[in-house]
Every structure is written in C-alpha cells, then in structure tokens.
Amino acid sequence: MTNNHRADFILVITTMLASAGWIFSKEAIQGLPSFGFIGLRFILASLLLLPLCYRSLLKVDRVTLFGSATVGCFLGSAILIWIHAIAVSESLGEGAFIMSLSMLFVPIFAWLFFKSKPPRIFWFSLPFAILGLSFLSQGNSWTFSGSQIWFVLAAVMLAIQFNLNSHFSQKIPTLVLTCIQLFVTGILGILVSTLTETWPQQIEPQIWGWLTMSILIATSLRYVLQTAGQKNTTTSNAAIIMILEPMWTVVLSMIWYGERMDLTKLIGCSLILFSLFIYRAGPLLLSRIKSS
C-alpha cells in the first residue's frame, strides 16, 4: 500500500469516527448538560493532545497564541450551537448534511474577509445546495425547523473558523493549533454551562462511557488521524473523502435510532451531497480530463 493510499484509508476511518461522534454526543447529553458535556469533552481531549505538542507550544509567541485562541472562540461557538442543535433535533442524518454545507460557506467568507473570489465551480454547485435546503424545509411547510436553523448557524460559524484557521495554520504547528482550539472550546463550554445549566445530582455510569468515547475516539483520535492523513494526500483527495461523514452519520442514525427520511428530505440530502461533490471533486475531475 502506497503512502497516498494509506493516507486515503486513514481519512476514510476519520470520517467514520467523526460520524460516530454524533451518536456518542447524542447519547451523552441524555444524562449530561449539553454545554457542560462539550466543556468536559474538549478540555480533556486537549489535555490528551498536550504531551504530543507541549514543546512546540512553549515556543509560540503571545501574539500568535492570542490569535489562535481567538480562532478557538469561533470553533467553540460553532460546537456549542451544534450540540444545542443535536439536543433539539429528531434527525441526526439531516443535521449532518446541513453541517456539511460549511464547506460551501467557506468561499463566501474568504471573499468577505480576504478578498479571495470563489472559483467558478462554486457558483455552479451553490444552486444545488440551496435547492437541497429547500427540499429539507418542505416537510415543515417550506419553513425551517428550530434544529435546522441551529445547524445552519453552526455551519456558518464553522466556515468562519475554517477561514481564520487556514490563516493561522501557516504560523503555528497543526497539533499546537488544534490543542489550543480544543482547550478554548472546552473553556467556553464550561463557562456557558455554569451560567445557563444545572448539573444532575447523579449521572449514570453509561453516560460517562459515552463521554469517554467522545473524548478518546471522536475527538483526540479523530483529529490525530485527520492530521496524519492530510499530510500524505492531496487537498482535493482529502476534501472528497470528507464528504463521507454525513453519509456515515445517516447510516449510523438509521441503525442506532431507527431514523427514516421521507422522499423530500432524501432528495434534499442528495442534492446537498451532489453540490458538495461538484464543488470538491469538480476541479480534480476537470484537471484529469485535460491531462488525459
């Protein structure tokens, strides 16, 4: 197996772990406050990554450290909105497809923040995404449900974080940046939980098990594997593979929760998936056609 094939395989595993994180989170917040769960999950995950990068972290100057923490605030905001959406949602698969739209929002904010015009393929794929969202809302008399709105807001925040993250990733090692952002996300979660939530007096043992799996598998291991996979493959390949996450989430939610989608929502998810495929795979396919 070549390095490229091994990297692609690692990224496929990464998408599976990310989709499993949706189930872990949904189960964990059955016994833990939503924001408190995020706080514990991300603080402990950052502490697990710390031994891998603490030497590099000590070399980071204060300005860069502050900037990285600021980016972490956007990640934290996106994650807190996301976990709230999960808490009020009846369909994880639908939410996963809406969240995947964050990659289509990225070029818009890159244009606003850094004057980087979106590629032509973006304008071709965007109408399919909008049409897909309209089909998802059709089951609610052409209006978005509360959870759908929260998922869209989370996707927007994640797109902003992605743009800022790309900027700071040029100045600081990947693991260090990841560790800082996970820690800041955890701190935000604990802060919001302290202000808005009441913790139960007793928490069932299985809830701690779901929290542990969220920390070890869906956060720490996932980010380490994603970093390792991206180092040995092209950005285009990585982007295409990451499309698998909402698909795995749908499969897992159908197996675990018995979720079913009606025809209009199935069409909506398919259109969103198609728009992402066009946007991410289009340039790669065109380059291969030209070179052949």
Image: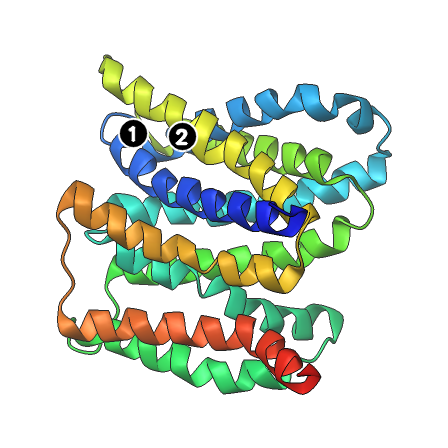
Residue 88 point in image, percent of width and height: 24, 48
Q: Answer with the quarter of the image where residue 56 lies.
A: top right
Residue contact between numbered discs 1 and 2, judged by CB atoms under 8 Å: yes
Q: What residue lies at 33% left-to-right and 30% top-to-bottom?
A: 197
- Structure colour scheme: rainbow
Q: Visible in this render: residue 205?
A: yes
Residue 117 point in image, percent of width and height: 69, 80
- For badge 1, the amino acid type reads Ala
Residue 141 point in image, percent of width and height: 15, 77
Q: What residue lies at 30% left-to-right and 25% top-to-bottom?
A: 198
Q: What residue lies at 42% left-to-right and 40% top-to-bottom?
A: 17
Q: Which mark is residue 114?
A: none
- For badge 2, the amino acid type reads Ser
Choose the circle earlier in sequence order: 1 or 2: 1
Mark 2 lies on a secondary structure that is: helix
Residue 292 appears left or right of 257: right
Q: What residue lies at 51% left-to-right and 37% top-to-bottom?
A: 222
Query: In the picture, which quadrant includes the C terminus?
Result: bottom right
Residue 225 lies, with reference to residue 283, above or below; the image says above
- Compare residues 34 and 5 and report the one nearer the observer: 5
Distance Cα–Cα, label 1 vs label 2: 8 Å
Q: Visible in this render: residue 92?
A: no
Residue 209 point in image, percent of width and height: 32, 19
Q: Answer with the quarter of the image where residue 235 lies.
A: bottom right
Report crowding for label 2: few under 14, some 14 to 19, many 20 or more residues within 10 A (C-alpha). many
- Compare residues 273 and 71 and report the one nearer the observer: 273
Closer mark to the observer between disc 1 and disc 2: 2
Q: Which residue is mark 1?
A: 28
Q: Which residue is mark 2?
A: 214
Mark 1 lies on a secondary structure that is: helix
